[in-house]
Amino acid sequence: MNDKPLQGRVALITGASRGIGAALAVEMARQGAHCVLIARTQGGLEETDDAIRAAGGQGATLLPFDLVKNEAQIDSIGPSIVERFGRLDILVHNAGELGKLTPVAHIDPKDWANVVGVNLTAAWRLIRTCDPPLRASDAGRAVFVTTGRVQHPKAYWGAYGATKAGMEHLVQTWAQEVEKTPLRVNLFDPTVVATRMRATAMPGEDPASIAQPADVAPMIAALCQPSLTRHGETVAAA
C-alpha cells in the first residue's frame, strides 16, 4: 500500500492554525502533499508548520490573513499558486465561523457579516480563484467542511446554519458545472469533534468524550486522493 498517496500534490487548506485544519495539514503532509495554509494568525500557522515538521513532513507555505477583513486578497491566491506551483491539486475550505448563538431576530449585523464572510463569501471567492488552477491539475480535488445543522435547523443557530446551507448549495452547483472535468468536488460533515468552535457552542461537554481533530483528518484526506471517484456528495464522519 502506498503510504504517501498525495506525494507531490499541492494542497490549500483554510482554517489551518488549529483544530481540524491543523490536523488535516499534518495528515496531508504525512501523505506527501505540500501544504499551503491559511489562517488569521502567523503564530498559529507556525505552530502547525512545526507540527508538520515534527511529524517528518516538509515545511508548509504560510498565508496569514483574515478571510473577512482581507477578503479581496483571496482573489490573488489562485494566480499566486499557479505562478509558484503551476497548478493546485487540492482545496479544503475548513475555516468556519459560528457567530453568537442567538435568536434570529437578535442577530447583530456585524456578527452576521462575519459569519457570512467566512462560511459563504470566502467559499465563493475560493471557488472563483481556485477553479483555474484546480482544472490545471490532472486530478483536482475540492472539499468544503459543512455541518448537519443544514438538514436539522435548531433554535439560536440561524446564522451558522443558514450560511452553511448557502455554501452547500454553491458547492453542489459548482460540482455540477465541473462534472465532465477531472475535478471532483465534495462536502464533508465531521459531525461531533472537539474543536474550539464546539467548545464555544457546548461549554459543558467533556472534549475527551468526543472525536478529536486527528480522528477525522484522514477521512478528509481520503476525499483528496487522485483515485477518488465520488463527486457532488456530502460525506459524514462515521
Image (spheres, helix red, strand yellow):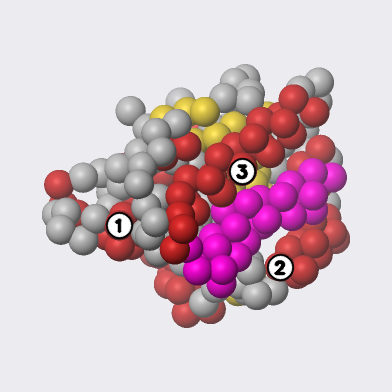
Q: Which mark is residue 167?
A: 3
Q: Residue at 74% x, 55% y: name it.
A: 125
Residue visible at 61% across and 42% down? 166
The Cα–Cα distance between marks 2 and 1, rounded to whole angstroms, is: 26 Å
Q: Nearer the viewer, residue 39 or 26?
A: 39
Picture quadrant of residue 116 = bottom right
Along the viewing direction, whichever of 65 and 217 lies nearer the viewer: 65
Residue wearing tag 1: 201
The local crowd at label 1, few if under 14, some if 14 to 19, many if 20 or more residues have their Cα within 10 Å, is some
Residue 139 at least partly seen: no
What amino acid type is highlighted by mark number 1? Ala
Q: Would residue 82 be seen by someone viewing this image from the given angle?
A: yes
**What's under tag 2, amino acid-wise?**
Glu
Q: Magenta stretch?
A: 107-132
Quadrant position of residue 169: top right
Q: Label 3: state its secondary structure.
A: helix
Labels 2 & 3 near each other (Cβ < 8 A):
no
Does the magenta-highlighted stretch encompass residue 44? no
For the residues bearing labels 2 and 1, Cβ distance under 8 angstroms: no
Q: How many numbered marks have been drawn onto this rendered protein structure?
A: 3
Q: SS of the residue at dot 2? A: helix
Give the spatial CA distance, label 2 vs label 3: 16 Å
Q: Main secondary structure of the magenta part?
A: helix
- Give the structural element (helix, strand or loop) at label 1: helix
